[in-house]
Image (cartoon, rainbow, N blue to C red):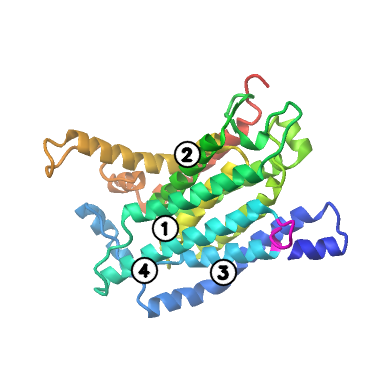
């Protein structure tokens, strides 16, 4: 919408930075303005979380969080959507398809997370027998979205470089100036792994006040830089990165996410007044994954999103080791961590919740800096 008006008044070549700032500011202010009303509504409807873990000590540590409003991620979804619609290149026959697909992912995963949260809350209130969606149900809808976006994004990104290859279809490897040419099948598989993996990784990280939101901001900043670099000819040549036409518009998606998460931290910082729930964590992770796919930096995301990788990896290690070491089905196996995801391990080890969150944020900044530094530390370039 704003893009149309800027073009109408011929504000040429200078409106991207203005739109990025506007998107961040609008999403931030929307969350700040709507937050108190949303919290009051959730409290009135008794839409509160009751954390329950398979660990008595952890239940004791988190008992004070009982009945804290959840599904606050709806605020994040609304704010991001509004900012993209106002400042993104969405409307008209030549609207940016990457941005449109981002909106689809936001709504799809936000609705999926909302349904899951609602079922869990109804179960806790004795209004339903279902404790959220089953794992395979969530996975099915996540896979469906990722396959759809993978196939469509591959087709939309059809272009040719001077050497006859398609930079929008290649897989770029950190610390190496080369790339791997992907078929449509391989591209779609990588899209599925990236989107589904990070959607669930952010969901697993969302277990302490401000933890997921702060880490999302850090990773999204890296993606914001990448979207700018691969979307502008001079920058892509300077850093020997692929030129992906239209990807620069993903900067609007990134700044909308950053603004919304900053606003949400206002209410989610310790002690949290509201939790984002699956309603917020699933779409945020999905958008992180999709932005990495568009910018062709799926492998670099593994570095930038190191905290999310640690959190998801700790769960997989814990579950896998537990199953491997149990003597027989139905019996207990051994554990690597006191409790997974990893932030609970440190919490049970005596770290205060605020210390865990702050240190994980610092780790996130280190991973982000390493990811950005790798752009110039590349062999063969």
Q: Which residue is mark 4?
A: 118
Q: Which residue is mark 1?
A: 209
Q: Separation of disc 3 and disc 1 at Cα?
A: 17 Å
Q: Are marks 3 and 1 in contact (CB under 8 Å)?
A: no
Q: Main secondary structure of the magenta part?
A: loop
Task: Report the magenta residues as a range.
Answer: 87-95
Residue 284 magenta: no
Q: Separation of disc 1 and disc 4 at Cα?
A: 20 Å
Q: Separation of disc 1 and disc 2 at Cα?
A: 19 Å
Q: Is residue 215 left or right of residue 89?
A: left
Mark linked to residue 32: 3
**Mark 1: few/some/many CA within 10 Å (<14, 14-19, 20+):** many
Q: Secondary structure at mark 2?
A: helix
**Which label sits in the foreground, 1 or 2?**
2
Q: Are marks 4 and 2 in contact (CB under 8 Å)?
A: no
Q: Which of the two labelled residues, at mark 3 and mark 2, occupies the earlier sequence position?
A: 3
User: Quick check: 368 above or below 240?
Assistant: below
Q: Are marks 3 and 4 in contact (CB under 8 Å)?
A: no
Is residue 28 shown to the viewer in this render?
no
Mark linked to residue 306: 2
């Amino acid at each position: 919408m704003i893009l149309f008006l800027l073009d109408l008044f011929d504000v040429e070549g200078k409106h991207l930075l203005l739109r990025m700032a506007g998107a961040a500011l609008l999403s931030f202010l929307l969350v700040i303005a709507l937050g108190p009303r949303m919290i009051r509504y959730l409290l009135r409807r008794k839409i509160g979380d009751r954390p329950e873990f398979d660990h008595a000590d952890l239940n004791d540590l988190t008992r004070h969080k009982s009945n804290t409003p959840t599904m606050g991620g709806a605020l994040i979804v609304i704010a991001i959507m509004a900012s993209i619609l106002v400042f993104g290149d969405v409307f008209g026959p030549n609207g940016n398809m990457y941005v449109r697909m981002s909106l689809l992912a936001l709504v799809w995963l936000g609705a999926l997370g909302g349904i899951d949260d609602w079922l869990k809350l109804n179960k806790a209130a004795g209004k339903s027998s279902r404790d959220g969606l089953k794992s395979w149900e969530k996975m099915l809808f996540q896979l469906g979205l990722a396959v759809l976006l993978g196939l469509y994004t591959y087709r939309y990104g059809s272009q040719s470089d001077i050497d006859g290859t398609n930079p929008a279809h290649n897989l770029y490897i950190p610390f190496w100036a080369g790339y791997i040419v992907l078929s449509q099948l391989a591209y779609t598989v990588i899209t599925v792994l990236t989107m589904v993996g990070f959607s669930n990784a952010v969901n697993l990280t969302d277990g302490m006040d401000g933890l997921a939101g702060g880490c999302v901001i850090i990773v999204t900043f890296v993606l914001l830089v990448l979207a700018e670099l691969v979307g502008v000819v001079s920058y892509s040549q300077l850093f020997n990165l692929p030129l992906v036409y239209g990807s620069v518009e993903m900067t609007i998606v990134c700044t909308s996410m950053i603004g919304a998460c900053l606003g949400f931290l206002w209410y989610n910082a310790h002690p949290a007044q509201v939790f984002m729930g699956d309603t917020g964590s699933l779409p945020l992770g999905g958008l992180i994954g999709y932005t990495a796919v568009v910018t062709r930096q799926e492998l670099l995301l593994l570095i930038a999103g190191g905290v999310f990788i640690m959190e998801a990896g700790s769960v997989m290690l814990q579950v896998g080791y537990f199953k491997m070491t149990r003597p027989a089905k139905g019996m207990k196996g051994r554990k690597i961590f006191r409790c997974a995801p990893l932030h609970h391990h440190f919490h049970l080890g005596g770290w205060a919740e605020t210390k865990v969150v702050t240190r994980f944020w610092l780790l996130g900044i280190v991973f982000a800096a390493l990811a950005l530094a790798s752009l110039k530390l590349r062999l063969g370039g």
